[in-house]
Image (cartoon, helix red, strand yellow):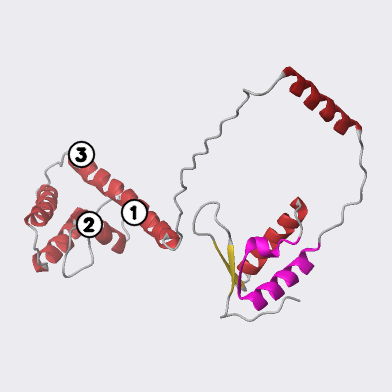
Amino acid sequence: MFKVETEVFSGPLDLLLSLIQKNKLDICEISISKIADEFLEIVSKAKFEDPEMISDFIYISGKLIEIKSRYMLYIKTEDDEIEELVFSLEEYARYKEIAQFLRDRYAQDYMYFEKIPEEIFIKQELDLSKLTLENIVEIARKRNKEEQIQVKYAKKQKSLSKKIRYIQDFVNTAKRCNFSDIVTQDDKDEKIVSILGVLHLVKENEIRAMQYRNFDNILLEKNENINKIYE
């Protein structure tokens, strides 16, 4: 990276761009004489440590001196030389803006950590060697009977607020337990409302939930740093 000790610049194009912005000049209407004087003055006071860095500054300085000399001697300057310099500055300004955008995004995201998913291999073999035609007919007959039986029942609505209180009381008493300990019934609704209750308490920092490997038990632990009561 380029460094100029007297100013905070990262290279000759950065220095030129800064001088143009300071003088409020249109990048396509550069005051060659004024910019060249300021550029050369700063470079003359700078201290360089890298030979490659010195060559870059000398190249830009030489370009400016050549263009300025042509203007002073009323010699027509090749349009390509000016256009090349302007194009370099425009490109540099765009890359500088993109670099700042990426730095801002990194600053926002560096606190987020991503868990690399584990590869899960499940090998399941189905043994059909002992299956007979009679077995298939019997299975089909039982399935048909089950479909004909219509069972009507009133599903009891699960209360999330009650479940949250239950989890709070359980964890406060046990200090640490498995997720399965707070599931009081073996049905889908009970598991769903239990998960929602745990997620709510984790969000509120009342408990911590940990799972060290895929398919391991989910451990619940009281957060001793926060003492809140769900109302």
Viewer can see residue 56: yes
Label 3 – label 2 distance at C-alpha: 19 Å
Residue 77 lies in the magenta stretch: no
Q: Is any part of residue 28 visible from this angle? A: no
Instruction: Tell me the tag on residue 79.
Output: 3
10 Å crowding of disc 3: few (<14), some (14-19), many (20+)? few
For the N terminus, the image quarter is: bottom left
Nearest to the observer: residue 113 or residue 33: 113
Rendered location of residue 3, percent (x, y)? 17, 63
Left or right: where 29 falls relative to 106: left
213, above or below 82, in the image: below
Q: Position of residue 66 (x, y in %)?
A: 10, 48
Whether residue 29 is situated above or below residue 171 in the rendered picture = above
Q: For label 1, count other residues whose C-alpha is less than 10 Å away and answer few (under 14), some (14-19) or many (20+).
A: few
- Whole-number angstrom distance, CA of label 1 to CA of label 3: 30 Å
Q: Disc 3 or 2, which lies upstream in sequence?
A: 2
| Residue at x-position 92% and y-position 37% | 150
Mark 1–mark 3 CB contact (< 8 Å): no
Q: Amino acid at mark 1?
A: Ala
Label 2: which residue?
16
**Where does label 1 land, which residue?**
99
Q: Are marks 1 and 2 in contact (CB under 8 Å)?
A: no
Under mark 2, the amino acid is Leu
Name the front one of labels 1 and 3.
1
Q: Which residues are magenta?
A: 159-184
CA neighbours of label 2 inside 10 A, class few (<14), some (14 to 19), many (20+):
some
Secondary structure of the residue carrying numbered label 3? helix
Q: Is residue 123 above or below residue 140?
A: below
Query: Which circle's residue, 1 or 3, is located before the other in the chain?
Result: 3
Residue at image x 81%, y 63%?
A: 159
- Mark 3 is on which residue type? Asp
